[in-house]
Amino acid sequence: MADITSCGHAGTLESSDVLIHIEPSQDIEINLISSVEELYGDDIKALVLEVLEKMNIKAVKVDINDKGALDYVIKARLQTAILRALEDGDKPDWSLL
Amino acid sequence: MKSEIQFSQFDSTNIRRVRKIKEFLDSVELELSEDIEIYVSAKEDEQIIACGGLSGKILKCIAVAPHKRGEGLILTVMTYLLNAAYNRDRKELFLFSKPKYLSFFEECGFHLIQRYENEIMLMENTHNLQEYKDNLIKLKKDGGVIGSIVMNANPFTLGHQHLVTEAAKRSSWLHLFVVKEDASEFKFKDRIDLIKKGVAHLKNITVHEGSDYIISKATFPTYFIKDKGKVNDLHAKLDLYIYKNHLAPALGITHRFVGTEPYCKVTNNYNQNMKKILEKEEAGSKPIKVVEIPRIEFAQKAISASRVRALLKEEKYEELANIVPPTTMEFLMKEVVNGRYN
Amino acid sequence: MRLRRSMLFVPGSNTSMVCNAFVYKPDTVMFDLEDSVAISEKDSARLMVFHALQHFTYADVETAVRVNPLESPYGLLDLEAVIRAGVDIVRLPKTDTVDDVLDMQNAIEKIEKEIGSKKETKLLAAIESALGVVNAVDIARCSKRLMGIALGAEDFVRDLRTQRTKEGLELSAARSHILLAARAAKINAFDSVFSDVKDKEGFIREVTYIKGLGFDGKSLVNPNQISTLHSIYAPTKQEIEWALEVIEASEHAKKHGLGVISIDGKMVDAPIIARAKSVIELAKASGVMGDDEDE
């Protein structure tokens, strides 16, 4: 299991992108701001959980400001934020991404 | 050969660039805030077309040239500012701008705390104000006159003690807020400690730690550089409206007590604004009565914290003992012995 | 033969470009992890491209990635990501020598072996210095993975101690040399970007010129340049007519077992037939071929 002990962030507020901030937490907490929240809010949260599970992260607070990003963009940004918060994040295990 | 928009980030040591930012802000009728640490600028053909600044946890001076609006530049400027803040482990942020840009910044994850007419608004990217209010409500007391005082007490003097005692006499319950920002000579921890000791004889009082929402760098940034005499009137008004519309209702406050201010123009001006704003009948909020309590004097001079600081510097400890309560005196002497004022 | 007229540059840090580049239907999408990406965003761009390459929107378009140099802290990480994501072509930046290509080839082979990939990732060498141009002939022939060489003009003119002009005289020696080296090695040759996106006339002039020199295509920075470039590369009516006649004649000869084909008394041999076929392919891709003309 990978422990999130510091903060990380990735992405932008530009159209088609997403800005993600993560920080240590006791459990998994997801806060989403999205222009498409009503339509896709649940999908986005499910996607976040999937990424976290694959990277073996059991506790983290994720703040997401979505600007209409595609799934893979959200994935890439979340993974970047996590890798930036992890100590050995500069040598990622590609099979988990 | 090509023209494209270049974004850059720099700090206040970059005087040439800061000067250009100031010129740009002048052109869009915004004032450069002197406490900005990090600047972001967007340039096209060597001309600044957008900028923004970060000061502590506050984003401000965010502007886009009129002919470049509507192209999403603001989102990139905001991304740079947020990254600059996040990189410094500042996540809970405030933002100053004009109310007409509300929706832009809502898109960036901020929401309104308070606006003042069409002049200024303060936003935050958390729900901390609501949380703070929810906690205040738990401390609400019943009674006819619910009094309040906001003080910095830098440090706590006999003057402060007189003000608090008088206010407590006239209130069913008194809420005393201590300015939390560590921007004064005496640290918050010491200031509140001296206040608590100095009001221990009063039974109908709650001493509250201040917050970002009451005379803080967020609500009232220029308060902390008031010695320079450059207090922004708009910030003062914003601070008072946050008090009137958010904090006071949470505690059911009916009165605010202040000491008369014979010396400091800035504080005096703040007191005048306070009367105007808090006592005004407006839809959506109850007016709050402002009561000025005359300062007590010693040897024909009003007692003030600045006088205390001056006497400390001049090492006139006997005179000092005449204007502070014994609890404050004890603390100050301990500090002197420990060499803090050498 | 694959058409490679337009190679659209997509900065890996520009999310909306990454997400939308396929829409413009360039022959090749080239994601950039090198110069267009700030140091602080190298990691995020790498992951973005890693995922984009695997997305279905890029399944049907040829993909290339310009990675950072191997000697930089990012080069190997870039390779790890893009090879795993199944990129078609790795574009090496700043290729000066044969060793630069061979080092990259070894690094790629190692990763392919590690992940058990059957795919043979191709290489495209960008030549961006005087040394690179001088070595172009050897570079073009040094690896079977090398599908082409490309001129990177911005760095090249700096190395020559001059600037780019719209006339492009400063590039003429390099362009000719790179083209000759590519043709001798039977690989593709690509011209550099034309970066003033507002100057459409200048762009048309330059594309007409490099097409005339013989370049297969050109790197582009703006999606709006794609259709212009494709229309300039489209064969003319006469060329199409000629190609159709050649193909007709060759099929007739095949059917009747004729050994020698001639049109207007001129011999038509295998290279000419191949050329005619590629004209037709180009005509179809360019949308200038009517249905009635279709074989």
Image (spheres, grey):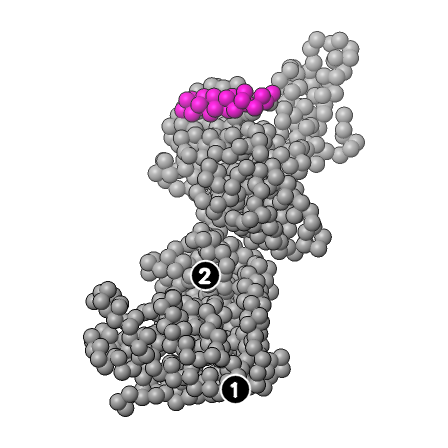
Instruction: Residue A36: give x, y in percent of width and height.
Output: 68, 54
| Pointer 2 and pointer 1 on the same chain | yes
Q: Distance between the residues labelled 2 and 1?
A: 33 Å
Q: Which residue is drawn at 70% across and 21% down?
A: C246
Given residues C281 and A60, the one toward you in this image is A60
Q: How many labels does the image show?
A: 2
- Quadrant location, the C terminus of chain C: top right
| Residue that mark 2 sits on | B57
Q: Does the magenta stretch include residue B3?
A: no
Name the N-terminal-most of marks 2 and 1. 2
Instruction: Residue C210: give x, y in percent of width and height.
Output: 52, 34
Given residues A90 and C49, the one toward you in this image is A90
Q: Residue at x 65, y 56 (%)?
A: A35
Three-letter amino acid code at the position of disc 1: Lys
Q: What stretch is highlighted in magenta?
A: C97-118
Instruction: Residue A79: give x, y in percent of width and height.
Output: 55, 41
Q: Residue at x 70, y 14 (%)?
A: C261
Q: Mark 2 lies on which chain?
A: B
